[in-house]
Image (cartoon, rainbow, N blue to C red):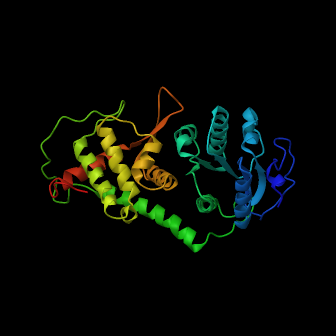
Amino acid sequence: MRDADFLRPDFAYGGGATSPVGRGGPGPGLSIYANRAHLRASLREDAEAAGMRLVAAAPLADLVTLGENLAQARLAEVILVDCPQVDAGVLAALARLDMRAASGTMRLIVSTGVEALDDVFACMDQSSPVLLVDPDRAERVLALGRVLAAMPAGGGAGGVRELSDDDRLMLVRLTEQVGQIAGRIDRLDLGAAGPRPAPPAKAPPPLLPGGPATPAQLPDARLVRRIIRQRQLRGRFLDNDLFADPAWDMLLDLTASRLEGKRVSVTSLCIAAGVPPTTALRWIGQMVDAGLFVRLSDGTDKRRAFIDLSDKAVQAMARYFAEISLTAPAPI
């Protein structure tokens, strides 16, 4: 394949023209927008191997120049955008894509860099796109697999290739783990024998502006931060990969931040998770779906968004700490 093939758009937007390329299988159509020619080439190969039908492979500028016409443009069923850095034009294009995807069946995969993550996350709050951070080729392939697995049988434009057993097991494992966590938290109470005496009451900690009052009492923020430090200390002596538990680490960080009256950005939460950012983003999405995390927009700056515990999670964490305070002085 010639590099020149990846330096031009593969079809004319909005004019009713069909793709002159027409490569790939009979599955859902894919449009790729990325400035790096080698990346467009590898994405094209992987998409075609997955049975997808390539509709476009073009530089990012082609997506940006659509502007307001994006709402009427002919687009593929799956759009993959690579934007390691962003500016106002790219963010505007992403926001329009997000709105378009939210109103239809189009699926979005967006890869970006750590520095741009908060901006990208904030402008895409409608369609729950798959977000990747500095991904490698395997992570992009997995993202395509996740999108294909979530599409209706037949993929709209045609059938799609079955995911491999390994990919399917990975997706199922992630979903099941979060489902189990949510189930355990739902079932967590003070025991069948009735409520036990709570620790000596303290004045309720301040919540974020507009946060609801909670009847259950969270512990002192210093205790939660001490637990977090103890968990991190293990990495000085043993391989941290042995203890990867991103859901719990994020729950602890959000609990401490809520007690301290701090808002948590998605980038900060990814760091707290202790796993690669793309993995952390998958967990954040699953925790939102499980009703444990909520996304909050900044009331004064629409370009910013934060993650917080849901009321359900706040109550569960408060009950958890009340329970373990009766049996363990320093839980980790």
Count of marks placed on residues: 0
Query: In the rendered image of this protein, does residue 28 appear above or below residue 225?
Result: below
Q: Is residue 15 left or right of residue 43?
A: right
> Which of the 4 image quadrants contains residue 3?
bottom right
Residue at image position (24%, 35%) is: 205
* Percent position of residue 314, x then y: 32, 45
Quarter of the N terminus within the rendering: bottom right
Q: Is residue 142 left or right of residue 179?
A: right
Residue at image position (66%, 41%) is: 97
Q: Residue furthest bottom?
A: 165
> Which of the 4 image quadrants contains residue 222?
top left
Residue at image position (20%, 50%) is: 322
* Percent position of residue 106, x then y: 67, 49
* Percent position of residue 46, x then y: 70, 63
Q: Nearer the viewer, residue 273 or 71?
A: 273
Q: Nearer the viewer, residue 60 or 181?
A: 60
Q: Residue furthest top?
A: 300
Residue at image position (70%, 58%) is: 43
Q: Could one spot residue 148 in this view of the protein?
A: yes
Q: Could one spot residue 71 in this view of the protein?
A: no
Query: In the rendered image of this protein, does residue 207 appear above or below residue 267?
Result: above
Q: Is residue 120 left or right of residue 192?
A: right
Quarter of the C terminus within the rendering: bottom left
Q: Is residue 287 left or right of residue 62?
A: left
* Percent position of residue 133, x then y: 55, 50
